[in-house]
Image (tube, helix red, strand yellow):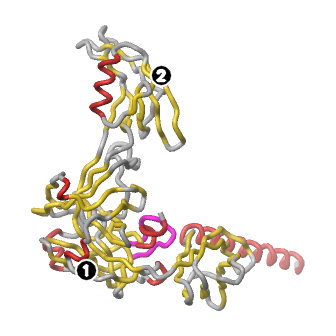
C-alpha cells in the first residue's frame, strides 16, 4: 500500500513537472521575443513572467543576473537561449545591443506609387478559343503571386507591354521567365486564338499599385511608413518593389468608420516631380521605407525623440501623432495589449480622444503609419483597424520597423 502511494506520488510529480515544462515551452514560443534589442552600456530590465532565464554566449559583453537584468556593453549581435529554471533549454534568441536611437515622429498622409518588378500573376484561367472550346493554356505552368519578368527574353515592365508582345507574337510558342519566392524559372505556353482573332495566354495579371498611407518616422536620411507591407488585394502577397515613389497627398475629407465597414481618408495625389517626397526602396511585412527627399520635420517643426525599445512600453495612456490641414495633432489613445513575440501586430490600441472620434469614429484607412508616442518616446505606429470596432486597432513596435525587418 505504501509502495503504491509512493509510486503514485512520483508519477504525479513527474506529470506536474511535465505540464510545467510543456507550458513553459508553449509560453516562450508564443510570448517571448525571438530578438531582444537593448541599449548599449546600461541595465535593461526584462520581465519574462515565468522562471525563465536567457543565457547569452557573449564573452562577458552581456550578462543576465538577478531578476532578468541585461547588462549590456559594446554594441553588437549576440546569440542566446531561453532556459526554464536554468535547466531546460528552450528556443534560441538574438540579443542586439545598439546605441540609443533617435527619430522624428511624423504622421503625414502620403501618396504611394509602387512599381512592381515585372507583371504580377493573379491567377490562370479558362478561355474560349475560336471554336468556342474552353481551354487553359497556362494551367499548372504559372501560379498566383509569381511575376512575369521576361517574354521571349524581352524584359517586361508593365501590363501594357505584355499585351502588346502577346499580340505581336500571335500563335508562336511563348517562353516566359517567372520570378517567385523560390527563384527564377522558365516556362513555355502555347497562345490560344480567340473568336475575335486575339491571342491569349489564359493568365490574369496586374501591375503597379497606388494608395494613401501615413509616414511614421524619419531616421537619418530614411523614412519609415505604414507599419505593414503593401500586398496584392487578390493574392494577399507582398508586392515586389521597383522604382516606387511617395508623394504629398491632398486630403480633402474623411469617411467615418463604422462597425463592419472601415472608414478612410479621402484625398488625391498629383504624380509630378515637384510633389515627390522620397522613393520606396523596400516593401516588407513591417512597412515601406526609402530615402527622404524633403526635410518634413523642419516644415512642421517636429522635434527629434528617442525610440523606445519594447521592454519600455507599458499598457495604458499614450498618443498618436497625425498631421491634418498642415497642423501637427496629438490624440489620446490607450495601449490595451502588448505582444512582444509577434513581429507585426505588437499592440492593440484604443482611440479615446473625443476630438478624433468626432472626426473619424476611430482609426480609418490611410492612418496606417501614424506614430505612437508614450512617455515622450516613440514606441511604434498604427497598422490596422479592427473592422468590428473602429475605435480599436493594431500597432507595431518602432524597433521592428526600423531595426528588425
Q: Is residue 385 left or right of residue 80?
A: left
The correct choice, above or below, for 97 with respect to 193 in the image is below
Label 2's element? strand
Q: Is residue 345 magenta?
A: yes
Q: Which mark is residue 188?
A: 2
State whether residue 365 appears in this view. no
Q: Is residue 368 magenta?
A: no
* Residue positioned 27% across, 31% down in the render: 160
The residue closer to the viewer here, 349 or 24, is 349
Q: Which residues are magenta?
A: 337-347
Label 1's element? loop
Q: Is residue 210 left or right of residue 133?
A: left
Q: Nearer the viewer, mark 2 or mark 1?
A: 1
The residue closer to the viewer here, 314 or 156, is 156
**Quadrant location of the N terminus in the rendered image:** bottom right
Given the current orientation, which residue lies at the most extreme top position?
131
x then y, percent, for residue 132: 30, 11
x then y, percent, for residue 3: 89, 77
Q: Which mark is residue 383?
A: none
The correct choice, above or below, for 286 with respect to 328 in the image is above
State whether residue 62 appears in this view. yes
Q: Is residue 340 left or right of residue 165?
A: right
| Residue linked to disc 1 | 302
The quadrant holding residue 303 is bottom left
x then y, percent, for residue 106: 27, 73
Q: Residues within 10 Å of mark 1 (few under 14, many from 20)?
A: few
* Residue positioned 44% across, 79% down in the render: 101
Q: Residues within 10 Å of mark 2 (few under 14, many from 20)?
A: some
Amino acid at each position: 500500500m505504501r509502495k503504491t502511494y509512493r509510486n503514485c506520488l512520483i508519477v504525479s510529480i513527474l506529470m506536474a513537472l511535465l505540464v510545467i515544462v510543456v507550458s513553459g515551452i508553449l509560453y516562450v514560443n508564443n510570448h517571448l521575443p525571438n530578438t531582444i534589442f537593448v541599449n548599449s552600456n546600461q541595465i535593461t530590465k526584462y520581465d519574462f513572467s515565468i522562471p525563465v532565464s536567457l543565457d547569452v554566449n557573449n564573452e562577458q559583453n552581456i550578462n543576465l543576473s538577478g531578476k532578468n537584468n541585461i547588462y549590456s556593453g559594446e554594441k553588437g549581435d549576440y546569440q542566446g537561449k531561453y532556459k526554464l529554471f536554468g535547466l531546460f533549454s528552450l528556443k534560441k534568441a538574438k540579443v542586439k545591443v545598439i546605441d540609443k536611437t533617435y527619430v522624428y515622429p511624423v504622421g503625414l498622409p502620403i501618396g504611394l506609387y509602387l512599381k512592381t518588378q515585372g507583371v504580377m500573376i493573379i491567377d490562370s484561367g479558362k478561355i474560349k478559343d475560336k471554336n468556342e472550346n474552353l481551354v487553359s493554356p497556362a494551367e499548372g505552368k504559372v501560379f498566383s503571386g509569381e511575376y512575369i519578368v521576361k517574354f521571349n527574353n524581352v524584359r517586361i515592365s508593365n501590363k501594357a507591354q505584355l499585351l502588346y508582345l502577346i499580340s505581336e507574337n500571335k500563335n508562336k510558342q511563348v517562353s516566359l521567365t517567372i520570378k517567385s519566392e523560390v527563384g527564377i524559372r522558365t516556362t513555355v505556353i502555347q497562345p490560344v486564338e480567340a473568336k475575335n482573332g486575339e491571342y491569349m495566354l489564359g493568365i490574369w495579371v496586374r501591375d503597379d499599385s497606388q494608395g494613401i498611407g501615413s509616414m511614421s518616422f524619419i531616421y537619418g536620411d530614411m523614412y519609415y511608413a505604414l507599419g505593414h507591407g503593401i500586398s496584392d488585394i487578390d493574392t494577399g502577397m507582398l508586392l515586389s518593389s521597383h522604382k516606387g515613389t511617395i508623394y504629398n497627398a491632398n486630403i480633402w475629407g474623411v469617411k467615418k468608420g463604422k462597425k463592419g465597414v472601415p472608414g478612410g481618408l479621402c484625398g488625391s495625389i498629383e504624380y509630378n516631380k515637384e510633389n515627390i517626397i522620397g522613393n520606396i526602396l523596400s516593401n516588407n511585412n513591417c512597412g515601406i521605407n526609402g530615402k527622404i527627399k524633403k526635410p518634413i520635420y523642419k516644415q512642421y517643426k517636429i522635434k527629434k525623440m528617442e525610440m523606445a525599445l519594447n521592454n519600455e512600453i507599458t499598457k495604458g495612456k499614450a498618443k498618436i501623432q497625425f498631421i491634418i490641414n498642415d497642423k501637427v495633432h496629438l490624440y489620446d489613445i490607450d495601449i490595451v495589449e502588448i505582444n512582444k513575440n509577434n513581429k507585426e501586430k505588437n499592440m492593440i490600441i484604443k482611440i479615446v480622444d473625443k476630438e478624433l472620434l468626432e472626426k473619424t469614429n476611430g482609426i480609418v484607412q490611410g492612418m496606417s503609419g501614424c506614430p505612437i508616442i508614450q512617455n515622450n518616446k516613440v514606441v511604434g505606429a498604427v497598422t490596422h483597424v479592427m473592422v468590428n470596432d473602429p475605435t480599436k486597432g493594431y500597432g507595431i513596435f518602432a524597433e521592428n520597423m526600423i531595426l528588425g525587418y
